[in-house]
Amino acid sequence: MPNAMKPSDTAIVIGSGIGGLSSAVILATLGFNVTVVEKNQRPGGMLRSFVRKGVHCNVGLHYLGALDRGQILRRCFDFLGITDQLPLERMGHNAPVDRYYFANAINGPDQFDMPVGLDAYESHLMDAFPAEKKPIRTFMEQLRANAAEFHRLDFLYNPRPMANLIEQTEPLWTFLDRAGCSPGLKSVISVPSVWIGVPADQCPLFYHTMILASYLFSAWRLKSSGAHLVDVLQQRLMALGGKLVTGRAVQRIDIHKGQVQGVTLDNGEPVAAANVIAAIHPKIVLDLLAPEDVKPSYRRRITALKDTDGMFSAHALVPRNGHQAIPHNIFSVRTTPNGAVDDVIYVQLRPCERPGYLLLSLLTSGHDALWQPWQHTRSGQRGEAYKRLKQSLAHRMIRQVEPITGPYNELELLDVYTPLSIRDWVNSPQGSAYGVMRSSRQLLSAAALNRTAVQGLYLAGQSIMAPGVLGTILGSLATTKFMIGPERFRREIQL
């Protein structure tokens, strides 16, 4: 860490989700004078849980992968200095991590359990599809190779292996077809692509294998809530000398002759800095720049990027006298005749702060078209018709999963939110849940997000590398590497 602060070591981070907070902690660890600016009164973005009737309801944090000693997320948390403050619960001990239920299974089982461990996963696939040993071995060979590169973090510390991964832009679906997988086997293997909001026929093979591998390495739940993780990151930032400004939106990124000067807040206050890290959606970044600040080609490229869809979610209280907590995640899956995942409802039933009750959390696709009549309204001002539609869809979703979980006769809805809620909360265009879609078709355009041609302007957040806690933190590290250069990165950031 440098002994004397240079003007070039000042940084403003826009946004305080996991991308903004992790970027800020990394830079503060390196000796930067960091200020995080957040438009909401409370930091955290989609990482922060919200509270209804004394119960924490998670939004973007449901479970974590690769957190065992020596594994990738654990090494990231250790570097950030937050591991010891997080109460963690291991999943998959003599039980599955995920349980898939297929409403219309094709040449395969109605139920598939995803375990911990690559060998166990291969064994489960073999048991479920005994006639497809050869295609399973073909897929597992690729999965193991990518998992090994991922574990070594080659893409951060050695440029060529990342190039090898980028060359694997072939969609997962194409690879599975080429391997000779049946529709049923393709259904089971492709469920994890839902975690990043990319359909299997568009999801680059290496992205899918990296996401899947992280949960096969190990899987964990936070015993507390997303708000607790936010608080831990905020406290770590403060301990490193960083600052956090909440309730203030950035109105403009100030640029002079191609060099960042700082930002102007919505109250007109200028905040000077040599570096600005925008940990918000790339399209929102464009709104903060004058037309002459970036090349028209860059603006066109970002504007044309397709985003992932929104999400619809419900949280409800369930009396303990009729149900037990479920230690694994449930995926209720519907597929097309060719095996493509057409609809998923994600389910958790966990203990909560309310004595005598469990928290039921359900998450599914956003049904974006349903909310078009309220597109030009803001949260809290959408009226009774909107509320009735939300509740109707929530109850329909609950009925869909009752054949799996059992009936909920005394359920109390706590909250229901739509893509419009996400749009208003974290400024995600159209309520996109996972940011820019990292599809094979636009991978190169998405990979160039940090090529702004503005000195001192960088992007972070879930759109940079991959969504989720791990994917977003790795994106923060990749942005830091781009910012400080590979030599200093290798010297000072040893994970």
Image (cartoon, rainbow, N blue to C red):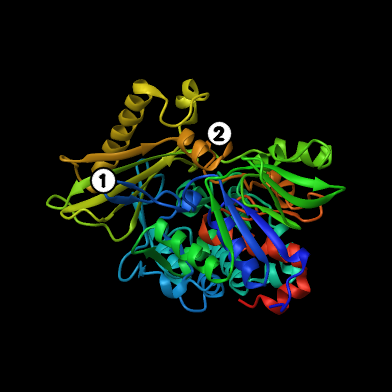
Left of 249 or right of it: where is 316? left
Quadrant in the picture for the C terminus = bottom right
Crowd class of label 2 (few under 14; some 14 to 19; many from 20; radius 10 Å): some
Furthest toward the right, the residue is 257
368 or 98: nearer the viewer: 368
Of badges 1 and 2, the one in the foreground is: 1
Furthest toward the left, the residue is 321
Left of 72 or right of it: where is 441? right
Residue type, numbered disc 1 = Lys
Crowd class of label 1 (few under 14; some 14 to 19; many from 20; radius 10 Å): few
285 or 474: nearer the viewer: 285
As drawn, the label of residue 455 is none
**Residue 142, quarter of the rendered image:** bottom right
Helix, strand or loop at disc 1? loop
Quadrant in the picture for the N terminus = bottom right
Q: Position of residue 254 (x, y in %)?
A: 76, 46
As drawn, the label of residue 53 is 1
Residue 22 visible in the shown view: yes
Q: CA distance from mark 1 to mark 2?
A: 29 Å
Identified at 60% across, 72% down, the residue is 148
316 in relation to 4, above or below: above
Residue tagged 2: 430
Residue type, numbered disc 2 = Gln
128 in relation to 76, above or below: above
Q: Position of residue 192 (x, y in %)?
A: 49, 53
**Residue 334, quarter of the rendered image:** top left
Identified at 44% across, 32% down, the residue is 379
Identified at 44% across, 52% down, the residue is 48
